[in-house]
Amino acid sequence: MLRLLGVRLTTMVPLLAVVSLLIYALIILVPGDPAVLLAGQNPTPARVEAVRERLGLNDPFLVQYGRWVAGLLHGDLGRSYLNGEDVWASILGRLPVTLSLVAVTLLFAALLGLALGVVAGLYPGRWIDRFATVLASVGVALPYFWVGMMLVLLLAINTPALPATGYVPLTENPVEWFRHLLIPGLALAITPMAMIARQTRAGVAAVMNEDYIRTAEAKGLSRSKVIGKHALKNAAVPVVTVFGLEANRLIGATVVMEQLFVLPGLGQLAYFSVFARDFPMVQGVLVFTAVLVLLVNLGVDMSYGYFNPKIKSS
């Protein structure tokens, strides 16, 4: 397991180098000159040129990129063009909001998806299996932002039971924290719930026909132990893979949901920074997001060793 961890961490280094180069290059190619926005209303060419010189935008691309990478290696993501705020501090300040939304979403998706998939896999071909298949297909097809708007209409406007916008920190009021994340979490959980249910159903249905399952039942083990200790564990590898993929997708989907529900997270920060041409902030958010995605993938890879000992020893 330690050897596998070392290999994965080693391969992350060149991957992050390529990602950082692509991020910086693509941001530089974004239309619009931040110096024009920062030079004030009706700026003169001389004022714009002075701003460009102050920000180092007149330097060659490799010089700018090298300066940025040197800052990254020292833990410095730069400062915002707009207000001079430290990019790293801005990211850490908004990170709990995004992580809270992703965590609540994955909790709903895992609980509902696993429950639906296990029941469908235990009774393949029956009405519950067909119901789960239809529900999973609908869940994949529905846009999460549309589901979010419908939930707002039903749970926040017609029946004012939950808040539609805003965020309360977990440390301030856990109940209000959960209430503010309930609607966006349910909306975002629709697709991952469907994907997890599909994979769980397929895995459980296949595993329940294996000889070791019949042997465990013949030994007198209870149905719950057979399912929990043998069936689910052996069917878990594809489910964990989907879980990791959906977690990575949710990190990007928060951009839309944080705008829709006025959540002050990384997605909202990236959205406003793009339109303001605040390149250091956009680059910092994208690099941080890339690291999060790589860490999620690393966690998924490491979990394979628990669910499949053959992977651990390979």
Image: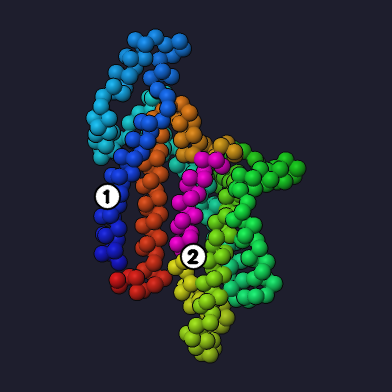
Between 94 and 187, the one lying in front of the other is 187
| Label 2 sits on residue | 239
- Horizontal side, residue 13 vs residue 106: left or right: left
The relative height of residue 135 versus residue 37 in the rendered view (above or below) is: below
Q: Residue at x 31, y 39 (%)?
A: 21
Please report the bounds of the magenta region as a residue range.
239-257
Secondary element type, mark 2: helix
Q: Are there few (<14), some (14-19), or many (20+) residues within 10 Å of tag 1?
A: few
In percent of the image, x 64 and y 66: which residue is there? Answer: 132
Q: Quadrant of the C terminus?
A: bottom left
Task: From the top left corner, tell me how far across and down residue 1 is, in percent.
Answer: 30, 66
Residue at screen point 42% across, 24% down: 32
> Is residue 45 visible in this depiction of the protein?
yes
251 drawn magenta: yes
Residue 83 in view here: no
Amino acid type, mark 2 = Val
Q: Report helix, strand or loop for mark 1.
A: helix
Q: Is 190 situated left or right of 91 in this image? A: right
The residue tagged 1 is 13
- Picture coordinates of residue 17 (x, y %)? 28, 44
Residue 168, x across and y down, in percent: 56, 40
